[in-house]
Amino acid sequence: MDEAYEYQRGIDAIWPDTEHLLPETVTKELATLTEENDRTGRLADRSIEALREAGYFGLPVPSDFQGGGATLVECCAVQRRIGAADPALSIGANMHLFSLGFMVEHWIRHRDESWVLLEETASKSRIVGSAFAEPGLGGSLTRSNCTARRIGDKWVTSGVKVPCSLAERSDVLCLQMVDEAGGPESLLVALVPTDLPGITVERTWNTLGMRASESDTVRMTDAEISDDMIIHRSAPGSVGDEVFAAGVGWFCTTATACYLGVVSAAIDQARKALANSKISHIGATRAALPSFQSTLGEIYTEVLPLETACAGLAQQLEERKTDPRSLVPTALALRHQSVEKAIRAVEMASELVGVASYSAKGAASRLVRDVHAVRFHPPTRFVTRQLLGRWALGLPWSFELTEQPMEDVLR
Protein backbone atom coordinates (compact mmCIF):
# COMPACT_ATOMS: atom_id res chain seq x y z
CA MET A 1 0.00 0.00 0.00
CA ASP A 2 1.22 3.55 -0.75
CA GLU A 3 2.90 4.92 2.39
CA ALA A 4 1.72 8.49 1.79
CA TYR A 5 -1.88 7.28 1.49
CA GLU A 6 -1.59 5.23 4.67
CA TYR A 7 -0.17 8.21 6.55
CA GLN A 8 -2.92 10.54 5.34
CA ARG A 9 -5.62 7.99 6.14
CA GLY A 10 -4.41 7.96 9.76
CA ILE A 11 -4.73 11.76 9.99
CA ASP A 12 -8.13 11.71 8.27
CA ALA A 13 -9.39 9.34 10.96
CA ILE A 14 -8.82 12.12 13.52
CA TRP A 15 -10.14 15.15 11.63
CA PRO A 16 -13.37 15.61 9.63
CA ASP A 17 -13.37 16.20 5.89
CA THR A 18 -13.59 19.96 5.24
CA GLU A 19 -13.29 20.04 1.46
CA HIS A 20 -16.81 21.53 1.28
CA LEU A 21 -15.71 24.39 3.57
CA LEU A 22 -12.33 25.08 2.01
CA PRO A 23 -11.47 23.34 -1.27
CA GLU A 24 -8.02 21.82 -1.67
CA THR A 25 -7.50 24.08 -4.69
CA VAL A 26 -7.56 27.04 -2.30
CA THR A 27 -4.98 25.67 0.14
CA LYS A 28 -2.73 24.74 -2.78
CA GLU A 29 -2.95 28.29 -4.11
CA LEU A 30 -2.23 29.70 -0.64
CA ALA A 31 0.87 27.53 -0.42
CA THR A 32 2.26 29.04 -3.64
CA LEU A 33 2.13 32.51 -2.05
CA THR A 34 3.75 31.62 1.26
CA GLU A 35 7.42 32.16 0.49
CA GLU A 36 6.86 35.61 -0.96
CA ASN A 37 4.58 36.54 1.96
CA ASP A 38 7.35 35.56 4.36
CA ARG A 39 10.02 37.43 2.38
CA THR A 40 8.08 40.71 2.34
CA GLY A 41 6.57 40.34 5.81
CA ARG A 42 3.11 41.18 4.42
CA LEU A 43 0.36 39.06 2.95
CA ALA A 44 -0.36 39.15 -0.75
CA ASP A 45 -3.85 40.51 -1.37
CA ARG A 46 -4.58 37.26 -3.18
CA SER A 47 -4.09 35.28 0.05
CA ILE A 48 -7.02 37.14 1.59
CA GLU A 49 -9.12 37.12 -1.57
CA ALA A 50 -8.76 33.35 -1.95
CA LEU A 51 -10.16 32.89 1.56
CA ARG A 52 -12.90 35.42 0.93
CA GLU A 53 -14.01 33.69 -2.28
CA ALA A 54 -14.23 30.41 -0.37
CA GLY A 55 -16.52 31.96 2.26
CA TYR A 56 -13.90 31.55 4.99
CA PHE A 57 -14.70 34.74 6.88
CA GLY A 58 -18.19 33.49 7.73
CA LEU A 59 -17.04 29.96 8.52
CA PRO A 60 -18.52 29.42 12.04
CA VAL A 61 -21.58 31.65 11.58
CA PRO A 62 -24.82 29.61 11.56
CA SER A 63 -26.17 28.96 8.08
CA ASP A 64 -29.42 30.73 9.08
CA PHE A 65 -27.33 33.90 9.15
CA GLN A 66 -25.65 33.24 5.77
CA GLY A 67 -22.56 31.70 7.32
CA GLY A 68 -20.75 28.44 6.68
CA GLY A 69 -22.34 26.72 9.67
CA ALA A 70 -19.02 25.02 10.48
CA THR A 71 -18.62 23.29 13.83
CA LEU A 72 -15.67 24.04 16.09
CA VAL A 73 -14.06 20.74 15.09
CA GLU A 74 -14.43 21.63 11.41
CA CYS A 75 -12.96 25.08 12.07
CA CYS A 76 -9.96 23.44 13.72
CA ALA A 77 -9.54 21.09 10.76
CA VAL A 78 -9.62 24.07 8.37
CA GLN A 79 -7.07 25.96 10.46
CA ARG A 80 -4.81 22.92 10.47
CA ARG A 81 -4.94 22.77 6.67
CA ILE A 82 -4.23 26.50 6.27
CA GLY A 83 -1.44 26.18 8.84
CA ALA A 84 0.24 23.56 6.68
CA ALA A 85 -0.09 25.81 3.59
CA ASP A 86 0.79 29.21 5.09
CA PRO A 87 1.38 29.35 8.87
CA ALA A 88 1.39 33.16 9.11
CA LEU A 89 -1.91 33.45 7.25
CA SER A 90 -3.36 30.70 9.41
CA ILE A 91 -2.46 32.31 12.73
CA GLY A 92 -3.44 35.77 11.49
CA ALA A 93 -6.83 34.63 10.24
CA ASN A 94 -7.32 32.55 13.38
CA MET A 95 -7.70 35.74 15.40
CA HIS A 96 -10.71 36.57 13.21
CA LEU A 97 -12.04 33.06 13.70
CA PHE A 98 -11.61 33.24 17.48
CA SER A 99 -13.49 36.57 17.67
CA LEU A 100 -16.27 35.19 15.52
CA GLY A 101 -16.42 32.06 17.68
CA PHE A 102 -16.73 34.27 20.77
CA MET A 103 -19.64 36.11 19.12
CA VAL A 104 -21.34 32.82 18.17
CA GLU A 105 -21.01 31.55 21.75
CA HIS A 106 -22.54 34.79 23.04
CA TRP A 107 -25.47 34.56 20.65
CA ILE A 108 -26.14 30.89 21.46
CA ARG A 109 -26.46 31.75 25.15
CA HIS A 110 -28.31 35.07 24.89
CA ARG A 111 -30.27 34.88 21.63
CA ASP A 112 -30.12 38.66 21.38
CA GLU A 113 -29.72 41.07 18.48
CA SER A 114 -26.06 40.11 18.02
CA TRP A 115 -27.23 37.78 15.24
CA VAL A 116 -27.35 40.91 13.05
CA LEU A 117 -23.60 41.38 13.50
CA LEU A 118 -22.98 37.72 12.67
CA GLU A 119 -25.07 37.96 9.51
CA GLU A 120 -23.34 41.17 8.41
CA THR A 121 -19.92 39.62 8.96
CA ALA A 122 -20.78 36.47 7.00
CA SER A 123 -22.77 38.04 4.16
CA LYS A 124 -20.21 40.80 3.53
CA SER A 125 -17.10 38.68 4.25
CA ARG A 126 -15.95 41.18 6.82
CA ILE A 127 -12.68 40.61 8.66
CA VAL A 128 -12.82 40.89 12.44
CA GLY A 129 -9.54 41.85 14.09
CA SER A 130 -9.01 40.43 17.57
CA ALA A 131 -7.80 43.37 19.65
CA PHE A 132 -7.54 41.71 23.06
CA ALA A 133 -3.77 41.68 23.56
CA GLU A 134 -2.26 44.70 25.30
CA PRO A 135 1.12 45.64 26.76
CA GLY A 136 1.25 45.38 30.53
CA LEU A 137 -1.43 42.73 30.99
CA GLY A 138 0.99 39.86 31.56
CA GLY A 139 -1.12 37.65 29.33
CA SER A 140 -4.37 38.21 31.22
CA LEU A 141 -7.43 37.42 29.11
CA THR A 142 -10.14 39.12 31.14
CA ARG A 143 -8.67 42.51 31.92
CA SER A 144 -7.83 45.66 30.01
CA ASN A 145 -5.71 48.75 30.59
CA CYS A 146 -8.02 50.67 28.26
CA THR A 147 -10.48 52.52 30.48
CA ALA A 148 -13.76 53.77 29.05
CA ARG A 149 -15.66 56.83 30.24
CA ARG A 150 -19.39 56.99 29.56
CA ILE A 151 -20.69 60.21 28.03
CA GLY A 152 -24.35 59.97 27.07
CA ASP A 153 -24.80 56.95 24.83
CA LYS A 154 -21.10 56.74 23.97
CA TRP A 155 -17.96 55.38 25.59
CA VAL A 156 -14.74 57.34 25.17
CA THR A 157 -11.60 55.21 25.36
CA SER A 158 -7.88 55.44 24.68
CA GLY A 159 -5.15 52.83 24.71
CA VAL A 160 -2.97 50.47 22.71
CA LYS A 161 -3.76 47.01 21.39
CA VAL A 162 -0.79 44.93 20.22
CA PRO A 163 -0.25 42.53 18.59
CA CYS A 164 -3.46 42.64 16.57
CA SER A 165 -3.34 40.27 13.59
CA LEU A 166 -4.66 41.52 10.24
CA ALA A 167 -5.36 44.86 11.92
CA GLU A 168 -4.85 46.89 8.75
CA ARG A 169 -7.13 44.59 6.75
CA SER A 170 -9.86 44.33 9.39
CA ASP A 171 -13.27 45.90 8.83
CA VAL A 172 -14.09 45.79 12.54
CA LEU A 173 -12.18 45.18 15.76
CA CYS A 174 -13.35 42.98 18.61
CA LEU A 175 -11.83 44.59 21.70
CA GLN A 176 -12.24 44.84 25.45
CA MET A 177 -12.14 47.90 27.71
CA VAL A 178 -13.03 48.64 31.31
CA ASP A 179 -15.71 51.04 32.53
CA GLU A 180 -13.82 53.50 34.78
CA ALA A 181 -16.88 53.74 37.01
CA GLY A 182 -16.43 50.09 37.99
CA GLY A 183 -19.26 47.72 38.78
CA PRO A 184 -19.93 43.97 38.54
CA GLU A 185 -19.96 43.98 34.73
CA SER A 186 -17.41 46.67 33.96
CA LEU A 187 -15.39 44.67 31.41
CA LEU A 188 -16.92 45.61 28.08
CA VAL A 189 -16.39 43.75 24.81
CA ALA A 190 -17.19 45.83 21.75
CA LEU A 191 -17.28 45.36 18.00
CA VAL A 192 -15.90 48.58 16.55
CA PRO A 193 -15.41 49.75 12.93
CA THR A 194 -11.71 50.04 12.15
CA ASP A 195 -12.25 53.40 10.44
CA LEU A 196 -13.81 54.93 13.57
CA PRO A 197 -12.30 58.37 14.30
CA GLY A 198 -9.59 58.04 16.94
CA ILE A 199 -8.48 54.56 15.81
CA THR A 200 -5.26 54.17 13.85
CA VAL A 201 -3.19 51.17 12.79
CA GLU A 202 0.60 51.35 12.87
CA ARG A 203 2.77 48.87 10.97
CA THR A 204 5.05 47.61 13.73
CA TRP A 205 5.22 43.85 13.08
CA ASN A 206 8.74 42.73 12.12
CA THR A 207 9.65 39.30 13.47
CA LEU A 208 11.69 36.19 12.82
CA GLY A 209 8.69 33.96 12.17
CA MET A 210 4.99 34.32 11.33
CA ARG A 211 6.22 37.38 9.50
CA ALA A 212 3.16 37.80 7.30
CA SER A 213 0.53 37.55 10.05
CA GLU A 214 0.45 41.38 9.98
CA SER A 215 0.08 41.53 13.75
CA ASP A 216 0.42 45.28 13.98
CA THR A 217 -0.44 47.93 16.59
CA VAL A 218 -3.87 49.51 17.05
CA ARG A 219 -3.86 52.86 18.82
CA MET A 220 -7.04 54.42 20.23
CA THR A 221 -7.10 58.12 21.09
CA ASP A 222 -10.39 59.36 22.57
CA ALA A 223 -12.28 56.97 20.32
CA GLU A 224 -16.04 57.28 20.78
CA ILE A 225 -17.73 53.90 20.85
CA SER A 226 -21.52 53.91 20.83
CA ASP A 227 -23.33 51.81 23.39
CA ASP A 228 -24.91 49.61 20.70
CA MET A 229 -21.41 48.42 19.75
CA ILE A 230 -21.05 46.68 23.13
CA ILE A 231 -21.68 42.97 22.53
CA HIS A 232 -20.79 41.47 25.92
CA ARG A 233 -20.29 42.52 29.55
CA SER A 234 -18.43 40.71 32.29
CA ALA A 235 -16.43 41.22 35.48
CA PRO A 236 -12.70 42.02 35.09
CA GLY A 237 -10.57 39.04 36.06
CA SER A 238 -13.61 36.78 36.28
CA VAL A 239 -13.32 33.04 35.67
CA GLY A 240 -17.06 32.56 36.00
CA ASP A 241 -18.18 34.01 32.67
CA GLU A 242 -19.46 31.19 30.48
CA VAL A 243 -18.99 33.04 27.19
CA PHE A 244 -15.38 33.92 28.00
CA ALA A 245 -14.76 30.30 29.00
CA ALA A 246 -16.19 29.09 25.68
CA GLY A 247 -14.04 31.70 23.91
CA VAL A 248 -10.95 30.34 25.67
CA GLY A 249 -11.89 26.91 24.35
CA TRP A 250 -12.21 28.28 20.83
CA PHE A 251 -8.84 29.97 20.97
CA CYS A 252 -6.93 27.09 22.56
CA THR A 253 -8.24 24.49 20.11
CA THR A 254 -8.07 26.52 16.89
CA ALA A 255 -4.63 27.97 17.71
CA THR A 256 -3.33 24.50 18.53
CA ALA A 257 -4.73 23.29 15.21
CA CYS A 258 -2.81 26.05 13.37
CA TYR A 259 0.45 24.82 14.84
CA LEU A 260 -0.45 21.21 14.17
CA GLY A 261 -0.62 22.34 10.55
CA VAL A 262 2.90 23.77 10.86
CA VAL A 263 4.06 20.44 12.31
CA SER A 264 2.33 18.57 9.48
CA ALA A 265 4.18 20.65 6.89
CA ALA A 266 7.50 20.05 8.66
CA ILE A 267 6.87 16.31 8.75
CA ASP A 268 6.09 16.34 5.04
CA GLN A 269 9.41 18.09 4.42
CA ALA A 270 11.16 15.39 6.46
CA ARG A 271 9.38 12.50 4.71
CA LYS A 272 10.33 13.86 1.28
CA ALA A 273 13.93 14.46 2.34
CA LEU A 274 14.29 10.94 3.70
CA ALA A 275 12.80 9.41 0.56
CA ASN A 276 14.99 11.45 -1.80
CA SER A 277 18.31 11.39 0.04
CA LYS A 278 20.51 8.42 -0.84
CA ILE A 279 23.60 7.51 1.17
CA SER A 280 26.05 6.43 -1.50
CA HIS A 281 28.27 4.03 0.45
CA ILE A 282 25.24 2.18 1.82
CA GLY A 283 23.32 2.23 -1.44
CA ALA A 284 20.01 3.09 0.24
CA THR A 285 17.89 6.11 0.93
CA ARG A 286 17.73 7.41 4.47
CA ALA A 287 14.05 6.38 4.51
CA ALA A 288 15.17 2.75 4.36
CA LEU A 289 17.38 3.01 7.44
CA PRO A 290 16.00 2.10 10.90
CA SER A 291 17.77 5.01 12.67
CA PHE A 292 15.91 7.57 10.56
CA GLN A 293 12.66 5.62 10.68
CA SER A 294 12.70 5.55 14.48
CA THR A 295 13.37 9.28 14.71
CA LEU A 296 10.37 9.98 12.48
CA GLY A 297 8.36 7.56 14.60
CA GLU A 298 9.36 9.47 17.74
CA ILE A 299 7.92 12.65 16.23
CA TYR A 300 4.59 10.90 15.79
CA THR A 301 4.58 9.71 19.40
CA GLU A 302 4.64 13.39 20.35
CA VAL A 303 2.21 14.69 17.77
CA LEU A 304 -0.59 12.14 17.32
CA PRO A 305 -1.81 12.37 20.95
CA LEU A 306 -1.90 16.16 20.59
CA GLU A 307 -3.89 15.87 17.34
CA THR A 308 -6.38 13.55 19.05
CA ALA A 309 -6.65 15.71 22.17
CA CYS A 310 -7.27 18.86 20.13
CA ALA A 311 -9.99 17.25 18.00
CA GLY A 312 -11.56 15.58 21.04
CA LEU A 313 -11.73 18.76 23.11
CA ALA A 314 -13.14 20.72 20.18
CA GLN A 315 -15.84 18.07 19.78
CA GLN A 316 -16.69 18.20 23.49
CA LEU A 317 -16.94 21.99 23.44
CA GLU A 318 -19.10 21.85 20.30
CA GLU A 319 -21.56 19.38 21.83
CA ARG A 320 -22.12 21.80 24.75
CA LYS A 321 -23.08 18.99 27.10
CA THR A 322 -20.42 20.17 29.55
CA ASP A 323 -20.17 23.63 31.07
CA PRO A 324 -17.23 25.27 29.23
CA ARG A 325 -16.00 26.72 32.51
CA SER A 326 -15.16 23.22 33.70
CA LEU A 327 -13.14 22.63 30.52
CA VAL A 328 -10.95 25.74 30.83
CA PRO A 329 -8.12 23.90 32.64
CA THR A 330 -8.13 21.21 29.95
CA ALA A 331 -8.09 23.81 27.18
CA LEU A 332 -5.18 25.66 28.74
CA ALA A 333 -3.27 22.42 29.35
CA LEU A 334 -3.76 21.56 25.66
CA ARG A 335 -2.31 24.89 24.59
CA HIS A 336 0.57 24.50 27.04
CA GLN A 337 1.40 21.12 25.53
CA SER A 338 1.20 22.55 22.02
CA VAL A 339 4.13 24.82 22.86
CA GLU A 340 6.43 21.96 23.83
CA LYS A 341 5.20 19.36 21.36
CA ALA A 342 5.00 21.58 18.28
CA ILE A 343 8.44 23.11 18.74
CA ARG A 344 10.06 19.77 19.50
CA ALA A 345 8.37 18.06 16.53
CA VAL A 346 9.42 20.74 14.03
CA GLU A 347 12.98 20.81 15.33
CA MET A 348 13.26 17.03 15.11
CA ALA A 349 11.80 17.11 11.59
CA SER A 350 14.30 19.80 10.58
CA GLU A 351 17.15 17.55 11.73
CA LEU A 352 15.81 14.82 9.47
CA VAL A 353 15.68 17.27 6.58
CA GLY A 354 19.33 18.08 7.21
CA VAL A 355 21.35 21.18 6.50
CA ALA A 356 18.68 22.52 4.11
CA SER A 357 16.61 23.39 7.17
CA TYR A 358 19.41 25.76 8.24
CA SER A 359 19.32 27.63 4.96
CA ALA A 360 18.32 31.30 4.93
CA LYS A 361 15.58 30.42 2.44
CA GLY A 362 13.20 27.54 1.90
CA ALA A 363 10.18 25.98 3.56
CA ALA A 364 12.09 23.89 6.11
CA SER A 365 13.92 26.82 7.67
CA ARG A 366 10.80 29.02 7.57
CA LEU A 367 8.82 26.42 9.51
CA VAL A 368 11.50 26.36 12.22
CA ARG A 369 11.11 30.14 12.57
CA ASP A 370 7.32 30.08 12.40
CA VAL A 371 6.70 27.43 15.04
CA HIS A 372 8.40 29.39 17.82
CA ALA A 373 5.56 31.92 17.77
CA VAL A 374 3.51 29.31 19.65
CA ARG A 375 5.32 30.42 22.83
CA PHE A 376 3.86 33.89 22.90
CA HIS A 377 0.07 33.54 22.68
CA PRO A 378 -1.72 34.36 25.94
CA PRO A 379 -2.17 32.95 28.43
CA THR A 380 1.54 32.22 28.62
CA ARG A 381 2.95 29.07 30.16
CA PHE A 382 3.88 31.08 33.26
CA VAL A 383 0.19 31.84 33.82
CA THR A 384 -1.03 28.40 32.81
CA ARG A 385 1.24 26.46 35.15
CA GLN A 386 0.21 28.57 38.14
CA LEU A 387 -3.46 28.37 37.19
CA LEU A 388 -3.42 24.58 36.85
CA GLY A 389 -1.52 24.14 40.10
CA ARG A 390 -4.01 26.27 42.02
CA TRP A 391 -6.92 24.50 40.34
CA ALA A 392 -5.50 21.08 41.27
CA LEU A 393 -5.11 22.18 44.90
CA GLY A 394 -8.62 23.57 45.11
CA LEU A 395 -7.31 27.13 45.50
CA PRO A 396 -8.75 30.27 43.87
CA TRP A 397 -7.38 30.64 40.35
CA SER A 398 -7.59 33.13 37.51
CA PHE A 399 -6.30 33.84 34.01
CA GLU A 400 -3.47 35.98 35.34
CA LEU A 401 -0.35 35.78 37.48
CA THR A 402 -0.97 36.55 41.15
CA GLU A 403 2.58 36.83 42.43
CA GLN A 404 3.79 39.32 45.01
CA PRO A 405 6.64 41.45 43.67
CA MET A 406 9.93 41.01 45.60
CA GLU A 407 10.03 44.69 46.58
CA ASP A 408 6.75 44.19 48.46
CA VAL A 409 8.16 41.12 50.21
CA LEU A 410 11.23 43.05 51.38
CA ARG A 411 9.27 45.99 52.85
Image (tube, helix red, strand yellow):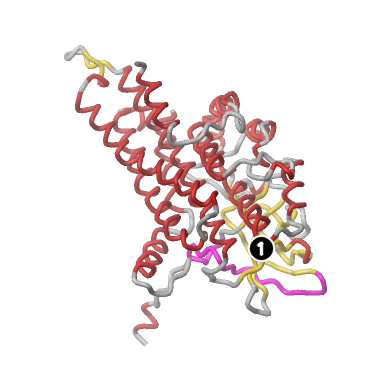
Foreground of the two, 378 or 331: 331
Tell me the quadrant of the picture where the N terminus can be found: top left
Q: Vertical placement of 298 versus 5: above or below?
A: below
Describe residue 81's horizontal placement relative to residue 335 as left or right: right
Above or below residue 284? Residue 215 is below
66 or 350, nearer to the observer:
66
Residue closest to the far right:
152
The residue indicated by pointer 1 is 189
Query: Residue at point 67% right, 45% down?
Result: 61
Across and down, in percent, residue 122 comes to: 72, 43
- Identify the residue at horizontal 68%, vertical 61% (top origin): 110
Occupied quadrant, residue 135: bottom right
Q: Give the range drawn in magenta.
A: 134-153
Q: In this view, does 339 lie to the left or right of 228?
A: left
Q: Is residue 3 magenta?
A: no
Predominant SS along the magenta part:
loop
Relative depth, front residue between 140 and 122:
122
- Callout 1, which amino acid? Val
Residue sitting farthest toward the bottom? 411
Q: Does the magenta stretch include residue 139?
A: yes
How far across and how far down the image is residue 251, in percent?
Answer: 53, 52
Expressed as whole percent of the image width and height from the top left, the position of residue 204 reads 58, 50
Looking at the image, which residue sits at the far left? 281
Residue 182 x, y percent position in the rendering: 65, 79
Task: Please determine whether, in this image, residue 326 is positioned above or below residue 15.
Answer: below
